[in-house]
Amino acid sequence: MPADLDKIHREREQLLHLHEQVLARAVAVVRGQAPPTGEKALDLSHHLAQELEAARAQLERQEVRIAELRQQLVDLEELKVQYRVLEETNERLMRQLLRMDDDLAERAELQQIIDMQKDALEKGARRVHELEERNRVLQHNIEVLERENELARERVFRLQEQMHPLIDVQERNHHEINRLRAQL
């Protein structure tokens, strides 16, 4: 699970770093602080739109992963219910065993069932303990992913806001090119 979280985090950081580089270059070109590299504003805005779409897809994948982690939490609760049922069954069998002192055959069978139930309870208890530990890790991972998703959403929103001037420049350039072509 932590490996999944690390992978998601690395992918998100790579995408955001690339977005920031492209956007910084585009803003520098638009402001005239850096010479154009030959990229047209249309190509630049198209590239930014692709990067934003990739970021949205990344967020969707992470939301699916969060839903999966939440389902695992639900599964843990179901296992706890099953464990309680096993405990109740074991207690009932123990009471029956005490009442059947005169019938050794039935007692032996019940003892075997009780032993199996005890084994099942011990395994269930270990499994519940493991799942509770896992639950704590999953809960932490969910909280981390939700915080990171919120930060990523904010970054995507900022990137979208920063694209508006580029689109305006692109439209002005397009009109200017059309005007110049018309003059030719």
Image (cartoon, helix red, strand yellow):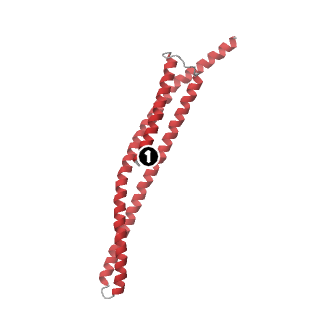
Q: Where is 141 relative to 101, above or below?
A: above
Rate crowding at label 1 as few (under 14), some (14 to 19) or many (20 or more) other CA atoms within 10 Å. Answer: few
Amino acid type, mark 1: Asp
Please state the horizontal and vertical placement of residue 94, each as a whole percent of the image: 31, 77
Q: Residue at x 46, y 47 (%)?
A: 65
Q: Residue at x 34, y 73 (%)?
A: 90
Please state the horizontal and vertical placement of residue 129, each as a whole percent of the image: 33, 59
| Occupied quadrant, residue 170 | top right
Q: In this view, does 11 lie to the left or right of 95?
A: right
* Residue marked by disc 1: 4
Please state which of residues 130 and 95 is positioned toward the viewer in this rendering: 130
Q: Which residue is drawn at 37% across and 73% down?
A: 116
Q: Where is 22 relative to 66, above or below?
A: above
Quarter placement of the C terminus: top right
Please state the horizontal and vertical placement of residue 92, each as a whole percent of the image: 34, 76
| Occupied quadrant, residue 112 | bottom left
